[in-house]
Amino acid sequence: MGKSKVSLVKKPEDFNIEEAIALVSSSSTGGIVIFLGKVRDENLGRKVEKLIYEAYDEMAIKEMERIRNEALDRFPIVDALIWHRIGELEVGENTILVVVSAKHRREAFEACAWIVDEVKKRVPVWKREVTDEGEFWIEGDRHVPVKR
């Protein structure tokens, strides 16, 4: 998959979690926190068939790099990694991987949660949900039907 700490991963490629851990590990690492997002089978009472992630690649990478750098400045962590998949992802498939290393677990947990929240708020990655009731663009807490 490459050795970048910030990446958009196009399906069919998936995350190599061991590689991700190695990329953020160092002799000062006392703990590593991993968040692995998955496609779930239900949302708001609708049966989810798949998610389709699209991105403005160049801007998404730049914003993820900004978020990573902000996390390194804001939290006493050793390192961080953000990988987001794009393409058509089936139920059970991985969507996002955030890995944070720190001397202590609390800082790693706090930074990891902050990174995930910021990615969802700021990165130009769009999620289309395909359900048994139709397709919807997911915009934060809003679900906007896809017009055909």
Image: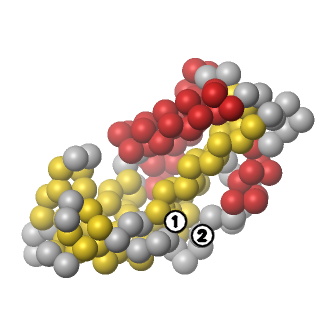
Does the rendering let one see residue 72? no
Q: Position of residue 13 (x, y in %)?
A: 59, 73
Residue in view at x 41 percent, y 66 percent: 39
Callout 2 secondary element: loop
Q: Quadrant of residue 103?
A: top right
* Label 1 crowd (10 A; few <14 / some 14-19 / many >=20): some
* Label 2 crowd (10 A; few <14 / some 14-19 / many >=20): some
Query: The residue under label 1 is which amino acid type?
Result: Asn
Q: Is residue 57 above or below residue 78?
A: below
Location of the C terminus by quadrant is bottom left
Name the residue beneath numbered marker 2: 14
Q: Position of residue 86 (x, y in %)?
A: 45, 65
* Nearer the observer, 103 or 8: 103
Q: Position of residue 139 (x, y in %)?
A: 24, 50
Q: Residue furthest right?
A: 27
* Nearer the observer, 39 or 106: 106
> Which comes before the other along the chain, label 2 or label 1?
2
Q: Position of residue 22 (x, y in %)?
A: 80, 51
Q: Quadrant of residue 120?
A: top left
Residue in view at x 55 percent, y 64 percent: 9
Count all numbered tags in the image, as a single digit. 2
Asked if the residue under mark 1 is in contact with the one under mark 2, i.e. CB atoms within 8 Å, the reply is: yes
Q: Which mark is residue 94?
A: 1
Q: Is residue 36 above or below residue 121?
A: below
Q: Is residue 3 left or right of residue 7?
A: right
Q: Is residue 104 left or right of residue 136?
A: right
Query: The residue under label 2 is which amino acid type?
Result: Asp
